[in-house]
Amino acid sequence: MPTMKSVQTAAAGAVEVVEIERPVPGPADALVRIRACGICGTDVFFLHMGGMPTGQDGEMRSLHLGHEPAGEVVEVGAEVTGLAVGDRVVVNPQGAPSGIIGCGGALGGMSEYLLIENAVVGESVAVFPDTLPFDVAALNEPMAVARHCVNRSEALPTDKVVVFGAGPIGLGATIWLKLRGVAQVTVVDVIPDRLKTALAVGADAVIDSSQEDVTARLTELHGQSANALGQPRPGTDVYIDAAGAAAVFNTVLASAKWKAKLVMVAVQKKSDDIDLGGMLRSELTLIASQGYPTEIFEVTAEIVAHQDRFAQLISHRVPFAEVEEAFRLTMTPGAAEKVVVTFED
């Protein structure tokens, strides 16, 4: 039986490359040779835990990693239509019947091959042209997360928007906001290189919150307004939290004008130190954004069209032979922004 290499969780903070049987597609399936796969904060979450809880006395089970794959179709089942050997595809990790790919399901995208169960174009996979590099195509899944966040914001071209966190999701949201026609988008972070990237992908202004008063700078950039009590506040219409820190949440509560919106896309770190009374003073609308109910393949054509802009989100391209180093980079604070693992021809 042919085998392949696949990455799975090991002890807490570590991965291991294991040799497993290569999947055999059934009549309704397809087999994809992976050419690139991104590493996500969710992967890091599983790594810190050492796998996924089983629910039995806190025991952990290992899981196959990788939910941001792009690759090339090498086998197609007899019942599959609209898909051919040689097609380049991105994958919907939530479309697998055996569970979310790379997030607890039976399959992982950080493997040499990936089985696409019930392969249906537009549902489980989308085809992209050979003009798009595989590493940029691997951004499809996180950019769908960012797109859903922007869709949830319902930002108008006339709105003034601030994005907290210049990681891949925050930068992706910045790109989508600008493509949506939003005239003023400001990005806040504490890492200078991230802020440079934010400007490069289209942000109109950036704020280093470790050096600057965020509220004062937003007032300069967005003008002055007021909260429900008439207290002066920046004229920011939409706040997007792609950072997940309690400090960000409280900055928004202290800065929000009357009827501003806060879209929460980052996983929040637990904190009891949140001033919920600030929501009353601004009648702030809190909007949660989870995943990509419809956006997973809505973004694909636009990534193709604007690939040079999206390519700037990738800070490191690491060959699969050095996959342990790729995960080490991702787990080291400040060492990398977006790491994509590439697979040799």
Image (cartoon, helix red, strand yellow):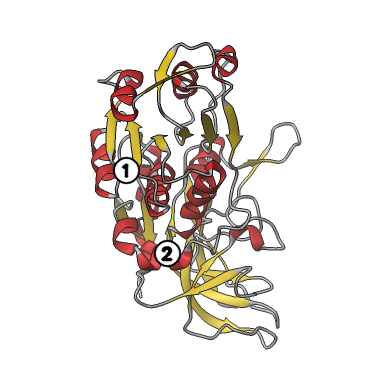
User: Residue beneath label 2, please?
Assistant: 302
Residue 78: percent from the left, percent from the top?
67, 88
- Label annotation for residue 222: none
- Res. 58 image quadrant: top right
Q: Which residue is mark 1?
A: 336
Type of amino acid under label 2 = Glu
Q: Is residue 230 visible?
A: yes
Q: Is residue 317 above or below residue 83?
A: above
- Name the residue nearer the viewer: 6 or 159: 159
**Is 240 drawn above or below residue 168 in the view shown?**
above
Please provide percent x and percent y for residue 171: 37, 45
Q: Quadrant of the C terminus?
A: bottom left
Q: Residues within 10 Å of mark 2 (few under 14, many from 20)?
A: some
Tag in front: 1 or 2: 2
**Quarter holding the N terminus?**
bottom right
Answer above or below: position of 335 versus 113. above
Question: Hey, what amino acid is under mark 1?
Answer: Ala
Element under label 2?
Answer: helix
Whether residue 343 is visible, yes or no, is no
